[in-house]
Image (spheres, rainbow, N blue to C red):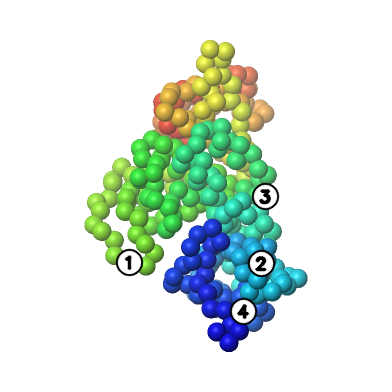
Amino acid sequence: MNGRVLAHGRDPYFPPWPDVAQLNAFDRGLRDATAAVLGDIGEQCDGIRCDMAMLLTNEVFAGTWGRHVGPAPDEEFWPYVLGRVRERHPGIVMIAEAYWDMEWTLQRQGFDHCYDKRLYDRLAGEDAESVRKHLAADRDYQDGLLRFLENHDEPRAATVLPGGRGRAAAVAIATLPGATLWHDGQFEGRRTRLPVFLARFPDEPADPDSVSFHRGLLSAAGSIRRGEWRMLETRGWPDNPSHRELLTWAWHGETPRTVVVINFSDQPAQARVELPWPGLAGRSWQLTDLLDGRIFTRDGDELAGGGLFVDLPPWGIHVVTLR
């Protein structure tokens, strides 16, 4: 139209969105306008989520729209925009919806947190070893991830991750470093996913067990996520390799020390968990499971030498503090 291109916004791998107009991310005026709008939003809230943020990086935008908008500017979109937003709101939390393994790129471009879709996929459909490999990344990268089990684009967790697997996955995202996203209705076990344009929920009775579990998990996670986090090693026996099904990590500041052990399988699992703390020997230790309140006493010499023995049922969980 008179040399202008009018287009729907789009992800290059899917059809265009019929309700979204595409703007030119290479245009300086659009970048200034985006910074102004985000700055105004920042007057009303503590954080902002940017939908499909990776589409506006120079490389992706050029690949999608370059033949219409010309060459990319020297500066990336998000560093330019976020720099100006933070001049107005230095403490605002910026969250990027991110896919295609572009989380690290967007973290370096100024976002505090990026969606951890890879972890979601692994928790929803893969095994403990796959999850463990994902968690081997550096702590700086982990701190910039946003863990979730459902959002407006994904099916409800109660349908994709029913029963024990869902609870095991919930403990994982709640006790890992980074941020945690809980979706509206997730605690209540809602099963109907609404389009973002529909504001009317169907009547669904809340699952009281799900509500109680998630409230307890939220309280436990809030009390332990401080200080140093590290993955832990497990050991099994020649005739029992089930320790490979366990996800294990620890949080520790000064006190208390906390161990998280998750059997991420549908079979029982046993192991010795190697604890990272010197000075365990020579005294007894009280272990309190923060999820169910059970209390155990363990000999420090055994903990220091052989490790913490665990025997978990399918999808079983321990979140225990040592005092």
Tell me what residue is drawn at x 52 percent, y 16 percent: 240
Pointer 1 residue: 199
Q: Amino acid at mark 1?
A: Ala
Question: Disc 4 marks which residue?
Answer: 30
Q: How many angstroms separate mark 4 from mark 3 (CA)?
A: 32 Å
Q: Which residue is mark 2?
A: 62
Q: Nearer the viewer, mark 2 or mark 4?
A: 2
Separation of marks 3 and 2 at Cα, in angstroms: 29 Å
Q: Nearer the viewer, mark 1 or mark 3?
A: 1
Q: What residue occupies the far right of the structure in this picture?
A: 74
Disc with the residue nearer the chain's start (4 vs 3): 4
Q: Tag 4 or tag 1, which sits nearer the N-term?
A: 4
The three-letter code of the residue at mark 2 reads: Ala
Q: Which residue is mark 3?
A: 140
Whether pointer 1 and pointer 4 mark residues with C-beta atoms closer than 8 Å, the reply is no
Q: In the image, is residue 36 above or below residue 275? A: below
Residue placed most toward the observer, 150 or 68: 68
SS class, disc 4:
helix
Q: Residues within 10 Å of mark 1 (few under 14, many from 20)?
A: few
- Give amino acid for label 4: Leu
Q: Residue at x 51, y 41 (%)?
A: 122
Q: Earlier in the sequence, mark 2 or mark 4?
A: 4
